[in-house]
Image: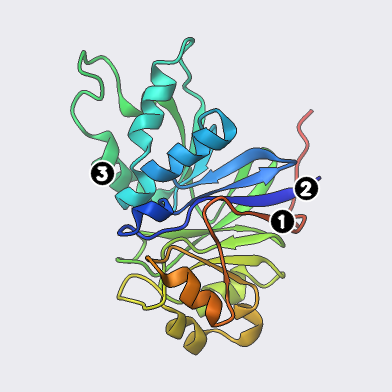
Amino acid sequence: MMWSLRFHGVGNSAAVELGSAMATIERDGKPWLGIDCGSEGLTDYVAHYGAYPRALFITHAHLDHVGGLERLFGAGYFAQPRRDDTRLYVPAPLVPLLQQRIASYPNVVAEGGANFWDAFRLVPVGDAFWHDGVRLECFPVRHHWPDSAFGLRLRGSLAWTGDTRPIPEQLARFADDGELVAHDCALHGNPSHSGIDDLEREYPPQLLARCLLYHYGRGDAEALSARGYRVARQGDCIALAEPRTLTIEHT
């Protein structure tokens, strides 16, 4: 079995030409679990796979990461026959934020008679959750406000930080098994996002060597690469190690 990570977008909210930060974990070349659903990222997803996502993990509720959900609602609700089984794995503290941000708009269709969640299977997430028989872990990160953003771990394979400041204490726990660390990083940081100087100050060289940087601004990729770091580009498909996680085969 082969695992990989495909980037549909790598840019921050101001660098829309780089695509909104979104990726998909693939298994044997097929989409297995998407991460976030920005508008530009969703466009790239559909262009590449020829279909809409069937399962997504949401890291936080900023619109460059969830702005595609309205379109995803339409794709499911108006399908023939109607689809209502697209799984949204949402960390529990984000559920009310996502409701306020996306789902509470009055009359999601003009005729009424529909709720936003009618097109989805919402799965609130705690410290861990199961997808397709595989256990994944969820952990809070440092972005914008406490308990407003979360990362994802596929043990032994991938640690995805989402938008964050440096989180050495979390990665010591959730990236301690050789995982590739897909990390928010621009050339310069700010109160909500990491810059490369922040990571160099906070992380040991062994961890930095496993980092793959994304969510950056215009021109940052070249500057980060020139400093010797591995930088994700839109369309990249990165091989992942086989997960070392409990797997259940349903019969």
Q: Any mark on residue 2, and which?
A: 2
Q: Any mark on residue 66, and which?
A: none
Which residue has dot 3 on it?
Answer: 101
Amino acid type, mark 2: Met
Q: In which quarter of the image is the N terminus?
A: top right
> At which x and y percent is residue 220?
43, 71
Q: Which image quarter: residue 153?
A: bottom right
Judged from the image, the secondary structure of the residue bearing numbered disc 3 is helix
Up the image or down, 146 lies above or below 39; here it is below
Amino acid type, mark 1: Ala
* Distance of label 2 from label 1 (alpha carbons): 8 Å
Residue closest to the eye, 14 or 136:
14
Is residue 61 something that shows in the picture? no
The residue under the point 54% across, 32% down is 54
Q: In this view, does 60 lie to the left or right of 55?
A: left
Amino acid type, mark 3: Arg
Q: Any mark on residue 239, and which?
A: 1
* Distance of label 3 from label 1 (alpha carbons): 34 Å
Whether residues under marks 2 and 1 lie with C-beta atoms below 8 angstroms apart, the answer is yes
The residue under the point 36% across, 67% down is 143
First in residue order: circle 2 vs circle 1 = 2
Q: Quadrant of the C terminus?
A: top right
- Callout 3 crowding tier (Cα within 10 Å): few <14, some 14–19, many ≥20: some
Is residue 90 something that shows in the picture? yes
* Distance of label 3 from label 2 (alpha carbons): 36 Å
First in residue order: circle 3 vs circle 1 = 3
Judged from the image, the secondary structure of the residue bearing numbered disc 1 is strand
First in residue order: circle 3 vs circle 2 = 2
Residue closest to the eye, 90 or 224:
224
